[in-house]
Image (spheres, rainbow, N blue to C red):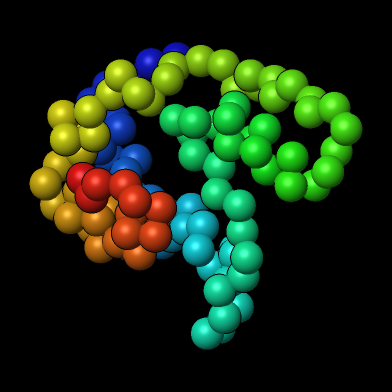
């Protein structure tokens, strides 16, 4: 099933306006009020080596292989600036600013 550009934009408007998009924030999952918890960041771009390095810190004998469990359309080939409106990009940047900075990603 493919959505049209207008359908994608309408869905994003609804997610942003309803607050559902905020459920995607990661930092609250890894912090307590005023306290940063120790984490091992695994980046999508380097997931295999990041996973291997993390498992090594656990002193596990054999590093298990990491399956490619979510197959389908890969977002790497998509440009959010061509999909979302300027207003939507502004809201996304404001909502996820702390995460863009913490995980060293460029804002949209």
Residue 19 shows in this picture: yes
Give above or below for 105 relative to 73: below
Q: Position of residue 92 (x, y in %)?
A: 28, 53
Residue drawn at (54%, 68%) of the image: 28
Give above or below for 103 relative to 53: below
In the displayed structure image, the side of residue 40 where residue 81 appears, left or right: left
Query: In the orientation shown, which residue stands out farthest toward the bottom?
Result: 34
Place residue 16 in its image quadrant. Answer: bottom left
In the displayed structure image, the side of residue 69 where residue 33 appears, left or right: left
Residue 64 or residue 6, whichever sits in front: 64
- Which of the image's four quarters has the C terminus? top left
Place residue 95 in its image quadrant. Answer: bottom left
Give above or below for 33 relative to 108: below
Residue drawn at (79%, 26%) of the image: 64
Place residue 71 in its image quadrant. Answer: top right
The number of numbered badges drawn on the structure is 0
């Amino acid at each position: 099933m493919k959505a049209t550009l207008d359908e994608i934009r309408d869905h994003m408007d609804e997610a942003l306006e309803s607050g559902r998009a905020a459920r995607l924030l990661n930092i609250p999952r890894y912090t307590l009020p005023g306290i940063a918890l120790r984490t091992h960041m695994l980046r999508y771009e380097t997931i295999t080596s990041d996973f291997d390095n993390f498992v090594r810190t656990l002193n596990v004998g054999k590093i298990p292989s990491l399956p490619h469990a979510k197959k389908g359309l890969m977002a790497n080939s998509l440009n959010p600036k061509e999909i979302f409106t300027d207003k939507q990009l502004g809201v996304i940047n404001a909502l996820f600013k702390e995460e863009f900075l913490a995980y060293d990603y460029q804002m949209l």
